[in-house]
Structure formats: structure tokens, C-alpha cells
Amino acid sequence: QVHLEESGGGLFQAGDSLKLSCVASGGGFGIKGVGWFRQAPGKGREFVGSISWTGNSVDLQDFAKRRFAIERDNAKNTAYLQIVDLEPEDTAVYYCARSIRTLPSRTTEEYEYWGQGTEVTVSS
């Protein structure tokens, strides 16, 4: 059974940077894409971005294109989400997920394994 665990969340100030990690065990990421999603308080889960299994293709949601970056290290079965110049609107629980596909995907139904999430709080 694949297990995903996110880390790196916490309390931040506006303008800070952070790097979230997602470690896969029990089978790892394989040749599957990895996605990042977030859920802000009182809102639904939204797509942030995803990366192909090779790492050569990244798809970022429009709001994420300026300040977010996704990468992965397949040797370590780890994916990363980096956010610079944090804003209070980035406050959310961030989830990583393993896709059923090799290429980036925006559809939650195409993700079969999910982590428990890591909470990010950004104060102004």
C-alpha cells in the first residue's frame, strides 16, 4: 500500500518562503505523476499543480504560476512544493497525491493515493 506523507508546514509571515515535501513509501511514486492540492478554511480542495513522472513536465494553476514551483527526486521518492513570497491567502492544508497517470493531471479523480496534508498558516 502506497503511503504519502507531507511535511514542512507551519506558521509563516507574509513574504516568507517555504518548501513542502511529500515522501512516498510502500511502493513510492513509481512512474506516476504527483499532484499538489490545497484546501483553505471553509473552502473546497483546489488544484495547485502537478508534475510528470520524469519531472520534465509541470502544470501549475494560474494563481500558482508566479510564486509556486514543483519538483521531484525519484531516487528519494520525494516531491516538493516551493512557495515564495507567501501571502495570507496561501493559508490552507496542502496535500500531495499520486496520480494514476504519468503526465500532469488537474482532476482529483485521477489521483489514487493521498497524504494527510500539512497545514500552512500565513500571517500578515
Image (cartoon, grey):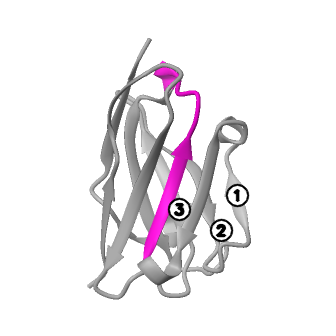
Residue 29 visible within the image: no
Q: Do the numbered discs 1 and 2 sit on residues whose CB atoms are within 8 Å? A: yes
What stretch of residues is rendered in magenta? 77-89
Mark 1 Cα-neighbour bin, 10 Å: few <14, some 14–19, many ≥20: some
Residue named by callout 1: 59
| Extreme residue in the top direction | 124
x, y percentage for residue 75? 48, 83
The answer to whether residue 69 is above or below residue 77 is: above
Q: In the figure, is residue 65 to the left or right of 34?
A: right
Q: Do the numbered discs 2 and 3 sit on residues whose CB atoms are within 8 Å? A: yes
Mark 3 Cα-neighbour bin, 10 Å: few <14, some 14–19, many ≥20: many
Residue at 59%, 62% (x, y): give it: 71
Residue named by callout 2: 104
Residue at 58%, 27% (x, y): give it: 85
> Total marks drawn?
3
Name the mark on residue 124.
Answer: none
Depth check: give the residue in front, 64 or 55: 55
Q: Secondary structure at mark 2?
A: loop
Residue at 73%, 72% (x, y): give it: 56
> What is the three-letter code of the residue carrying label 2?
Pro
Q: CA distance from mark 2 to mark 3?
A: 7 Å
Residue named by callout 3: 35
> What is the three-letter code of the residue carrying label 1?
Asp
Mark 2 Cα-neighbour bin, 10 Å: few <14, some 14–19, many ≥20: many
Residue at 41%, 57% (x, y): give it: 21
Residue 31 visible within the image: yes
Q: In the figure, is residue 5 to the left or right of 59?
A: left
> What is the three-letter code of the residue carrying label 3?
Gly
Say if the magenta span includes residue 88. yes
Q: Quadrant of residue 104?
A: bottom right
Q: CA distance from mark 1 to mark 2?
A: 6 Å
